[in-house]
């Protein structure tokens, strides 16, 4: 008996790994390199499309807690991320190419994972299946899923540009992490005075945007977490200064003062040869990106190895069709994982793959499926996708707001977040012990 996993993105790789580590033969289907989505370029698995940051690392943060829970459940991606990290202050960022290569190597070398490079155009009729085709599911399969699930929703996502380090004017840039947290070279900072900022801002809001050729929405929904910088700027002249260009926690060593605004560049690779523009997801035309972003001090002659792009992400109306174990209400042997379920973010997607993989095995073995307690971050996300409002369901990333309140309440925010994390990890360990989930998942009781 085997389990089929469709899609070798973040969620699909986690699901396949969990299934194979549990001793079950796994048939993993990936359409690359025969066919690519509009946003994918690498033939490797677990390709990172937008940022190379996996968000905050502190376990007392929502993103950090999520990653620690994944580690304790034997996450493949967290193991690979920890070996491919690059300096990023208080965040966990990775060399995106090294990360994908590491995941691909682990998956392809696993003796119980059998890889098929082909496009699946229909939902398999028999057996247990995990669909982890992501928010850019190919049209043929997307139509079948939409028909089965009574339609789907969508929002628009954007990626930030990447520039070469050697093309930067370093005499105008200083290296520092905000508030001195993390390595000094984690971020490069391009300071702008008031005049430079206003000139850049006016050029940005008037720049020409790329048409959404294949996207049929007249007024597309844009996910707040990946808001194009030009859309954000349209909300007012100071929006960027209180957002991705905020100067707090930084001082320009040339002047000794805090700049009016700061554009941060974060390392893309371990060697520090590539940097991405933090918070600069965009849908500007490529020529406009070079012109407008070239107005940022230090980027006048920047060489772009990748321009920002915008694409449509599709997700299910999960509260209507999915259970909290990520199985389809109407077809319990069919599981979904990843952003298509309505979790938002790299690690959120991967965590849903872990749970879908674990539950696919439990279904195969005739055991009740497992939903983690809502007091854990993974459990709270799976609870949200199954119980959020059907009428206005929107993607959700890790945050403490979706978790049950503490009893008694903790007023201090820092102490409250620490208490959330402590409670979550304590409850998770109890589940791991009760269900026989070992850290390496060699045996799934």
Image: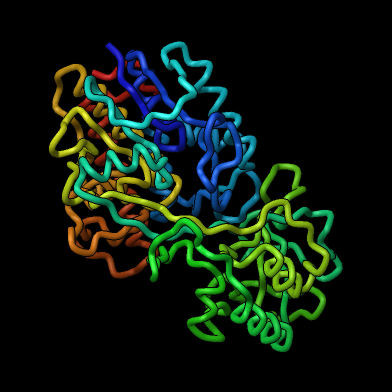
Percent from the top left, x then y, of residue 90?
Answer: 56, 55
Q: Residue at x 75, y 48 (%)?
A: 272
Percent from the top left, x then y, of residue 327?
Answer: 21, 36
Quadrant (top left, top right, bottom left, bottom right) of the C terminus: top left
Question: 215 left or right of 416?
Answer: right
Percent from the top left, x then y, of residue 41?
Answer: 60, 41
Q: How is the image coloured?
A: rainbow
Q: Residue at x 31, y 55 (%)?
A: 419
The quarter holding residue 357 reads top left
The quarter holding residue 362 reads top left
The foreground one among 337 and 189 is 337
Quadrant (top left, top right, bottom left, bottom right) of the N terminus: top left
**Looking at the picture, does residue 227 appear above or below residue 44?**
below
Question: 85 left or right of 432?
Answer: right
The quarter holding residue 294 reads bottom right
Q: Residue at x 23, y 39 (%)?
A: 372
**Looking at the picture, does residue 175 appear above or below residue 29?**
below
Q: Residue at x 84, y 54 (%)?
A: 166
Question: 214 left or right of 369?
Answer: right
Q: How many marks?
A: 0
Does residue 69 appear in this view? no
The foreground one among 208 and 16 is 208
Percent from the top left, x then y, of residue 290?
Answer: 73, 66
Does residue 89 appear in this view? yes
Question: 25 left or right of 322?
Answer: right
């Amino acid at each position: 008996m085997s389990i089929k996993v469709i899609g070798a993105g973040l969620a699909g790789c986690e699901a396949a790994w969990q299934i194979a580590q549990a001793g079950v033969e796994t048939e993993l289907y990936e359409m690359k390199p025969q066919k690519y989505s509009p946003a994918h370029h690498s033939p490797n698995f677990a390709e990172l499309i937008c940022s190379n940051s996996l968000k905050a690392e502190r376990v007392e943060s929502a993103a950090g807690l999520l990653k620690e829970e994944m580690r304790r459940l034997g996450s493949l991606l967290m193991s690979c991320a920890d070996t491919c990290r690059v300096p990023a202050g208080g965040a966990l960022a990775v060399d995106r190419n090294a990360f994908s290569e590491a995941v691909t190597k682990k998956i392809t070398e696993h003796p119980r994972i059998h890889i098929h490079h082909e496009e699946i155009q229909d939902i398999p009729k028999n057996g247990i299946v995990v669909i982890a085709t992501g928010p850019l599911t190919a049209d043929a399969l997307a139509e079948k899923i939409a028909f089965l699930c009574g339609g789907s929703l969508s929002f628009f996502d954007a990626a930030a540009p990447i520039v070469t380090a050697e093309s930067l004017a370093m005499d105008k840039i200083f290296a520092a992490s905000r508030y001195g947290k993390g390595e000094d070279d984690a971020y490069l900072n391009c300071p702008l005075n008031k005049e430079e900022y206003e000139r850049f801002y006016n050029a940005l809001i008037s720049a020409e945007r790329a048409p959404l050729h294949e996207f049929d929405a007249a007024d597309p929904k844009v996910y707040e977490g990946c808001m194009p910088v030009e859309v954000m700027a349209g909300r007012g002249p100071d929006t960027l200064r209180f957002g991705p260009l905020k100067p707090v926690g930084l001082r320009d060593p040339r002047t000794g003062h805090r700049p009016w605004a700061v554009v941060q560049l974060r390392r893309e690779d371990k060697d520090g040869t590539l940097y991405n523009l933090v918070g600069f997801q965009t849908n500007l035309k490529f020529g406009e990106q070079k012109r407008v972003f070239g107005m940022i001090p230090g980027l006048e002659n920047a060489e772009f190895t990748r321009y920002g792009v915008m694409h449509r992400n599709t997700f299910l109306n999960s509260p209507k069709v999915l259970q909290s174990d990520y199985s389809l209400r109407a077809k319990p042997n069919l599981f979904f994982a990843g952003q298509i379920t309505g979790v938002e973010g790299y690690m959120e997607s991967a965590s849903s793959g872990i749970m879908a993989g674990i539950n696919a095995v439990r279904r195969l073995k005739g055991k009740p499926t497992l939903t983690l307690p809502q007091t854990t971050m993974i459990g709270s996300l799976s609870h949200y996708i199954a119980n959020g409002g059907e009428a206005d369901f929107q993607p959700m990333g890790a945050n403490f707001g979706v978790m049950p309140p503490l009893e008694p309440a903790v007023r201090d925010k820092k102490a409250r977040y620490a208490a959330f994390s402590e409670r979550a990890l304590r409850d998770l360990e109890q589940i791991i012990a009760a269900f026989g989930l070992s850290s390496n998942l060699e045996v799934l009781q």
